Image (spheres, helix red, strand yellow):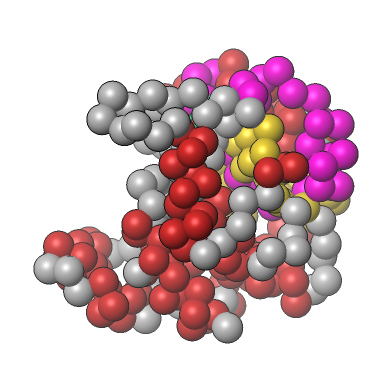
Amino acid sequence: MNSSVRKFIFHDLQAIEGYIDPPDALVFLAILRSQQSASLQGGLAEIGVYYGRSYFLLRKICGDREKIVAIDPFDIVKPDHSLTQYERFAAGGRQLGLSVDEERVIKSDSTLLRPADVIERAGLIRFFSIDGGHMLPHVEADSRLAAASLAEHGIIVFDDTFNPAWPEVTAGVTDFLREEAGRYSVFCLTKYKTYVCRRPFHEFYAQTIKTSPELKTFDHIETEFLGSTAIRLHNPMRRRIAYEVMVGLGMRAWSERAYR
Ligand SMILES: C[S@@+](CC[C@H](N)C(=O)[O-])C[C@H]1O[C@@H](n2cnc3c(N)ncnc32)[C@H](O)[C@@H]1O
C-alpha cells in the first residue's frame, strides 16, 4: 500500500501547485501509518489549504472515510486563472480522483474559529497541520486552536519554521512551546517543518521517525530543542540535486528512486 502512496507523492501530487515536498510527505506517511498501526484514532485538520497539495496527500494516505477539516478563506485571486481558489482546489481533487469532503471545509480566517468548530466536524484531531497565515497573531491563534482540539495522542505540524522569510512563524512556535511549559515537545525537525506532540507521546513518535522504512534514507541527527530531543532529518544536497535534475528532465517516475 505504501508503494502506491509513494508513486502518488513523486508523480501525481506534483500536478497540484503547493508547498509540500517529498521529505515531509514521507514524514506525513510515516506518522499516519504509525498512528493507524497503534489504533490511535481521531480526525485530521489543516489550516492553509491553498490548492490542496497537502490535503490530497492526507486523503490519499487515509482514504475516503477519514474526516479531514480544511480551513482557508479561499480568497486568493490569480489574474491568470478564471477559476476561484476553491474551484481550483475542487478541480485538483477531480483530477487526482480524490474526494473533497465539503461538509468539513471551513471557508474562514482561522483566527476567528473556536475549537468546537473543528471538533464538531471531525472529533478530536490526531494530525493537525498549520500552514495558514504566517504572522505572529496567526501562529498564536492557530497553535491555540490546534492544541485545544487535539486528541491526547495527536500531533501538530508547523510549516515554514526556521525559514528566514517568515521569522514570526519561528517566534510563534517557540512562544507556544515555552508557554505550554513542557506539556508539548518537538519530536522531529525537517528543513521546512516542526513536528510536535504531547510529552507522554514523545517516545512513541520519536520511535516512529527512527524506525520508519520510509525515512531510513535520511540522516537522523539528534537535536536538543527547548527541553526535548528531536530527530532532525537531513536531506543531503546530492539527493536534492539528483531529484531536481530528474524532475527537470521529466523523469518523475524515476525521481522516487532518489529517496530510497
Ligand atoms: C502556503 S499556502 C498553504 C500551502 C498548502 N498547505 C499546501 O500544501 O500546498 C497558505 C494558505 O494559507 C491561507 N491563509 C492565509 N491566511 C489564513 C488565515 N488567516 N486563515 C486560514 N488560512 C489562511 C492562504 O489562503 C493559503 O491558501
In the image, what residue occupies the spot 66% across and 72% down?
33
Residue numbers of the magenta segment = 108-136
Q: Is residue 110 above or below residue 55?
A: above
- List x then y, in percent, for residue 110: 65, 25
In the image, what residue occupies the spot 62% across and 21% down?
109
Looking at the rendered image, the quarter that the N terminus falls into is bottom right
Does residue 108 appear in this view? yes
Is 255 part of what is drawn in magenta? no
- List x then y, in percent, for residue 245: 14, 66
The residue lying toward the viewer, choosing from 86 and 160, is 86
Is 129 part of what is drawn in magenta? yes
The residue lying toward the viewer, choosing from 46 and 180, is 46
Kindly indicate the quadrant of the structure image that contains residue 46.
top right
- List x then y, in percent, for residue 92: 45, 52
Looking at the rendered image, the quarter that the C terminus falls into is bottom left
Outermost residue, front side: 82
In the image, what residue occupies the spot 69% across and 71% down?
34
In the image, what residue occupies the spot 69% across and 64% down?
64
Q: Is residue 202 above or below residue 109?
A: below
Locate residue 127 relative to residue 238 in the image: left or right.
Answer: right
Kindly indicate the quadrant of the structure image that contains residue 37.
bottom right
